[in-house]
Amino acid sequence: MAMKVLYASNPLERIFILIAALVLFGFQGTYSQRSNEKKEFYWAQLFADGVMHRSDSLIYYLRDKPKYEYDYAFLGSAIDKLGSIDKKYSAYMQAYIDYFISEDGKISGYKLTDYNIDRIRPGLNMLELYKRTGNEKYRIAIKTLVSQMKEHPRTHSNGYWHKKAYPWQMWLDGLYMASPFLVTYANLFNQPEWFDEAAFQLEEVYKHTRDSKTGLVYHAWDESRQQRWCNPETGQSRHFWSRGTGWYMMALVDVLGVLPSDHSKRNQLIGILNDLSLSLLKVRDIKTGLWYQVMDQGNRDGNYLEASGSAMIIYAFARGAKAGYLPHKYLKLAGESFEGLIKNLTETGDDGFPVLKNTCGACGLGGEPYREGDYNYYISEKKVDNDQKGVAPVILAAIELKK
């Protein structure tokens, strides 16, 4: 659009006309920009930019002291997937990982003999960085994590313990922490036995946590039946936790994304994904398309629509449908649920970036002080705005849905 030049003899009038023209074109530029803003990956970038605006470094996002941790690596991975749009996103993730890995490949803040499966998740970031750079320090660090998994304690039926501090227990969370790493490692380093291991673990936890009545999966299983939080007959915990289920759903679709097409367990994992997805539709909130913190308790007093678990399920639905693991209808459902999440669980912060509400900060079982895993426990854990465990799957879901 060409600017029409207006003449005015009065200098003040000329200044006024110039200012008016600049304001007009400024508004037109803003409108044009905003009308195009909601292109592909609008929400993905907006959430990622919000994280980076609020913290120059992922190391200090929502915390004062650096810590080698699964959820920060998870958020870094999500942001990194936008690296093809702008390299700043990949640099943000890499800076976090590089803070903890020395040039000789040692991992600061990591202790192998803790046998904590959560500590494996940053390995996915390391694998990506090794593919990208070929830097030997990443390979050495990756091998350290693989060494842990070779020695990691197991149940009598060979399921990985969640960590040494929680003996004989499998938690749904742990399947996402290790299985995608193992299949990605197997693929990159030509170690096919790890395909088998990852697939076995996904089947094993499903077998022990699935509820025959609802088809949902309990948060955890204690093989020893010694924990107060478990059913003394089945070893299963008491409730279906949204994020626990979300971790497991993401593990399924991410493993299937790497598992060879002719792998003997592929069809079984696709079957599990379909069965669990169908069960999740039965407890999906009709009005919002989201899922409750305690999944089968609906609007019972204290229960709430939880952001992280909902976003993880949305991501799994979208990726699963696009890849052909799930019927195509799940892609439409994922889109509707994503819109429900934006409408009901986000607001705009003072900085202009979205604030993600209703993310459960943490939920565990046993430990000190002891967590009983009853209904009141799950609904009472602190909710954290913009928690990394919520923002990360929102970004991933937005990328899958091109939103």
Image: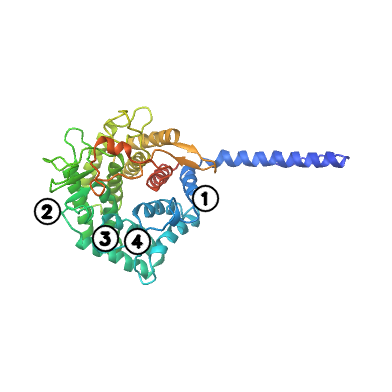
Query: Which residue is denoted by mark 4 in the rendering?
Result: 127
Q: Earlier in the sequence, mark 3 or mark 1?
A: 1
Q: Can the viewer see residue 327 in this picture?
A: no
Sequence-wise, the earlier of marks 4 and 1 is: 1
Q: Is residue 397 visible?
A: yes
Label 3 and label 2: CA atoms lie apart by: 25 Å
Q: CA distance from mark 4 to mark 3?
A: 11 Å
Three-letter code for the amino acid on which mark 1 is drawn: His
Instruction: Please tell me whether mark 2 sits on a helix, a strand or a loop.
Output: loop
Q: How would you rate the neighbour count of disc 2 (Cα within 10 Å): few for under 14, some for 14-19, many for 20 or more?
A: few
Whether pointer 3 and pointer 1 mark residues with C-beta atoms closer than 8 Å, the reply is: no
Mark 3 vs mark 1: give the one in front.
Answer: 1
What is the residue that sits farthest to the front in this orientation?
369
Q: Amino acid at mark 4?
A: Leu
Q: Are marks 3 and 2 in contact (CB under 8 Å)?
A: no
Between 165 and 343, the residue placed more toward the observer is 165
Q: Where residue 56 appears, x then y in whole percent?
A: 50, 55
> What is the CA distance from the residue labelled 2 to the residue labelled 4?
30 Å
Which residue position is annotated with label 3?
186
Task: Name the side, left or right, on which 343 lies relative to 225.
Answer: right
Closest to the observer, 192 or 174: 174
The front one of 316 and 294 is 294
Quarter residue 107 falls in:
bottom left
Q: In x, y percent, where is residue 346?
A: 45, 37
The alpha-carbon separation of the residues under discs 1 and 2 comes to 48 Å
Going by the picture, which residue comes out furthest to the right?
9
* Mark linked to residue 53: 1
Q: Which quadrant holds the N terminus?
A: top right
Contact between labelled residues 3 and 4, with CB atoms less than 8 Å apart: no
**Residue under pointer 2:** 156
